[in-house]
Image (spheres, rainbow, N blue to C red):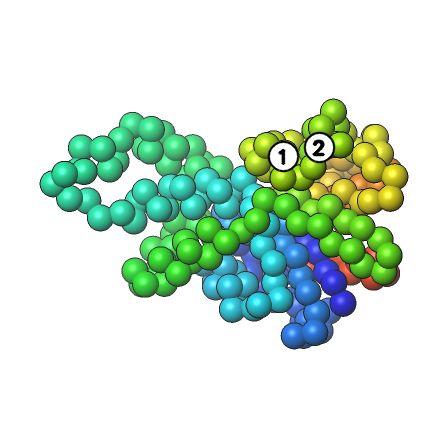
Amino acid sequence: MTYVMSDPHGQYQMYKKILAEIGFSDDDELYVLGDVVDRGPESSQLLHDMSLRANVYPLLGNHDATARYILRRLCQEITEENYATALDGELLSALAMWQFDGGQATLDSFKLQSPDERDALLDYLDEFEPYETVEVGGKRFVLVHGGIPYDKRTYPLDRQDIAELLLTRPDYSKRYYNNTYLVTGHTPTVNIDPASSGRIWQANGHIALDCGAGHGLRLGCLRLEDFAEFYAE
């Protein structure tokens, strides 16, 4: 079976509950549409678990991209040659913004790892893809973290701007494709429709997966074969 979820935001316990509920096995596939890290307490544990599973496919979210950039800079060796630029104003400003937006939880989790474990987690973050396409049961799905600008919906995915794929909030009132679902995270479903708070939202060829796990709500997961929904809190 093929499953999709998004925005687990360091909620490793919710992620484990979902895997247990769906009976996730080596014969299944799971696509995680980004924002694996930040806000929740166990980003490192979640990344480590995902990295050990060859059938879990991570996509890049804006929080993952920011964490990767800052943690790489913080982990570089400071020498006589680079000490003046290693912790420059740009990095310190980005660090402060990231900490305020949930990054402190990731930083705390990261500090508990050995240097080798930190390197392995950062290498894994480098493997996150900006998009995927999946065909299941004759249905086609485009998977991205944020979305695609409506006026660029006909552009090939490899010509899309990566920053827009991470940060765009789709126009959920408009159907993008005739025979394809656009599957996204990033925008909590409560912000699309208050009645969908903590639930997966579907309409107009869109599937929105961010159920608010990073904001005290639930983690959602959808099985693409039959659109069955699963939740953990």
- Quadrant of res 130: top right
Residue 155: numbered disc: 2
- Residue at left 86%, top 57%? 138
- Does residue 43 appear to the left or right of 77 in the view shown? right
Q: Given contact means CB atoms under 8 Å apart, are the residues at marks 2 and 1 in contact?
A: yes
- Other residues around mark 2 within 10 Å, as few (<14) / some (14–19) / many (≥20): few
- Residue at left 48%, top 64%? 48
Dot 1 amino acid type: Arg
Residue 127 in the image, given as x and y percentages of width and height: 50, 54
- Quadrant of res 117: bottom left
Query: Mark 1 highlights which residue?
Result: 159
Q: Quadrant of the N terminus?
A: bottom right
**For residue 12, above or below residue 97:** below
- Residue at left 14%, top 38%? 81
Dot 2 amino acid type: Tyr
- Other residues around mark 1 within 10 Å, as few (<14) / some (14–19) / many (≥20): few
